[in-house]
Amino acid sequence: DNAANPREGVFKAAVAKLQLLRPDFVLSVGDFIHGYDEQKKPIDDEQVVRAKRRAFDDLLQPLTVRFYRVPGNHDINNDLSARIWKDLYGPDYYSFIYKGTLFMCLNSQDGPRYRSGIGKEQIAWAKDVLAKHRDATWVCLFLHQPLWLEDEKRLERAKDNGRKPQLSGFDEIEKLLAGRNYTVFAGHHHRYGKWLKNGNRYFRLATTGGQSALAGPEAGQFDHVMWVTMTTGGPVVCNLLLDGILDEDAKSNMPDPQAPGQ
């Protein structure tokens, strides 16, 4: 997550460190640009949005491995940003197979008026993809907002109000995954966390340059990349703190943490 007053230089450093590590490819959990104006409304100036997108994409140039995107609320939040995303990057949700693992990259901004949620068309697409790849050894889902936590809040509110809950649609994705081995990766809250649901692990990543108090692992606030190794028993996960990845000269090459946001 690189949004909400991104700290200049952090994501650039992360790309350089990923290039040293040389993974097979890199997947994201969204929020690459700061997509709101000073009044906290979605930016409606096309030139501004495109300039922000170019500036971020330029940061990726040193990376020689494939970079997979999912949109966050800073990336898609109105008709303009949705159109620009599709113009530059194509579909806002998609899947691919790699060495027997099914990777599903979801759009968690698919609710009404680009708010949090998974729309009916995306659910139908997910149903088709999962049916087509029944033989996949594992399913890895990537999305920006941890919608399972959003659904927990909606259920609690509905209980307090005595109303039927209006869930995000991610619950429908979970139903489709029943009986499958899967792991979920999300972001959005700028705070690391791990949950066990339905016998599967759900991860919420921290930041890679996004706004953070950087209070440390105990608070779940740190800049990192997550290194995932697929095994026959599923993903083995470890978190690499950016300032702990040193180059061959034993240099961290991290920006000043007190530097203002861009």
Image (cartoon, grey):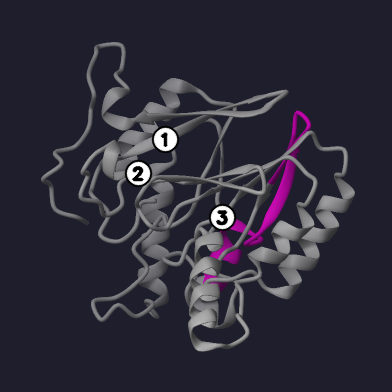
Looking at the image, do the residues carrying marks 2 and 1 touch, with CB atoms under 8 Å apart? yes
- Identified by mark 1, the residue type is Val
Could you tell me how far apart the alpha carbons at marks 3 and 2 are, in whole angstroms? Answer: 16 Å
The residue under the point 48% across, 61% down is: 72
In x, y percent, where is residue 174?
Answer: 70, 57
In the image, 146 versus 243, the foreground residue is 146
Q: Is residue 38 above or below residue 175?
A: below
- Occupied quadrant, residue 25: top right
How would you rate the neighbour count of disc 1 (Cα within 10 Å): few for under 14, some for 14-19, many for 20 or more? many
The residue under the point 41% across, 35% down is: 225
Could you tell me how far apart the alpha carbons at marks 2 and 1 are, in whole angstroms? Answer: 7 Å
In x, y percent, where is residue 216?
Answer: 24, 38
In x, y percent, where is residue 40?
Answer: 30, 77
Is residue 132 magenta-colored? no
Q: Which portion, as a residue range, is magenta? A: 82-103
In the image, 192 versus 242, the foreground residue is 192
Q: Is residue 69 above or below residue 155?
A: above
Q: Is residue 63 above or below residue 1?
A: above
Quickly name the residue at label 3: 143
User: Counting residues from the N terminus, which is met first, the one under dot 2 or under dot 1?
Assistant: 2
In x, y percent, where is residue 27?
Answer: 55, 42
Quickly name the residue at label 1: 225
